[in-house]
Image (cartoon, rainbow, N blue to C red):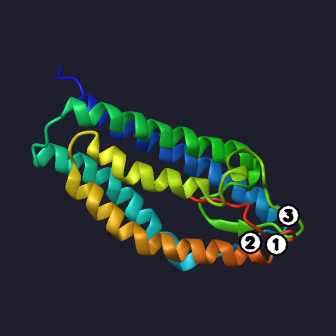
Amino acid sequence: MSSIPPYTLLVLLVAVERLAELVTARRNAAWSTRRGGIEYGRGHYPVMVLLHTGLLAGCLAETGWGGRPFVPALGWPLLVLALAAQALRWWCIGTLGPRWNTRVIVVPGLPLVDAGPYRLMSHPNYLAVVVEGAALPLVHGAWITALGFTLLNVPLLAVRLRCENAALAVAPGAGPAAAVAAP
C-alpha cells in the first residue's frame, strides 16, 4: 500500500479545514438569521467558492502533473507562512464567534468587533487569504497556481471588500473594525 505524499496530505488537510469552516459558517449564518441578519453580496460568493476550490485543486494538479519538486529552502519557510495564515484565520473565527461567516451577513444592532486581530487591522482574514493563496502552492513549487490564484483573487477581493465595507457602514459604530469575515 502506498502512502500519501506529504504535500498531498497537507492540501487534503487544508480541504478538511475548509469543510470545518463551511460547517461553522452554516451554523453562524443560522445564528445571524435568527437575529435578523442581512446578507450582502450574494452574487460574488459562488465565484469565491470556485476560486478557493480551484486553489486546492491547482496545488494538487500542478505538483502531481507538473512534476514540481519540493525545494526545502523555499518550501519550509512557505509552510510556516501557510500555517500562520491558518492560525490567523482561526483567530478571526474565534474572535468573531457566531458572527464569523464565509458570507457577508450583518446583524442589525450589534456593535462592530474591535478585539483580537481586529484591533490591528480592518480585515485580517483577507490577509490570511492572500498569504495562503501564495504560500500554500509555493510550498511545493506550484508557482502557476500561486500566480493564477493571486491574479484572480485581486479583483474578487476588491469586490468583496467593497461589499463588506458597504455592509459594515450601515452597522452602528461603523469604522475600521469588522463584524463579518470571509474565507
Residue 35 is marked as 3
Q: What kind of residue is marked 3?
A: Arg
Tell me the quarter of the picture where residue 47 sits: bottom left
**Callout 1–callout 2 Cβ contact below 8 Å:** yes
Which residue is at a point 29% across and 55% down the rendered structure image? 146
Q: CA distance from mark 1 to mark 3?
A: 14 Å
Q: Amino acid at mark 1?
A: Ala
Q: Is residue 149 above or below residue 72?
A: below
Q: Check disc 2 and give the amino acid type.
A: Leu
Identify the image quadrant of residue 166.
bottom right
Residue 41 can be seen, yes or no: no
- Residue 140 lies left or right of residue 38; in this view the side is left
- Of the numbered discs in the image, which one, if any, rests on residue 168? 2
**Tag 2, which secondary structure?**
helix
Please indicate whether residue 97 sits to the left or right of residue 26 in the image. right
Relative image position of residue 172 (x, y in whole percent): 87, 71
Residue 169 in picture, x, y percent from top left? 76, 76
User: Residue under circle 1?
Assistant: 171
The x, y position of residue 40, in whole percent, is 66, 76
The answer to whether one can see residue 68 in this image is yes
**Label 3's element?**
loop
Toward the right, the furthest residue is 109
Residue at 31% over, 31% down: 76
Q: Are marks 1 and 3 in contact (CB under 8 Å)?
A: no
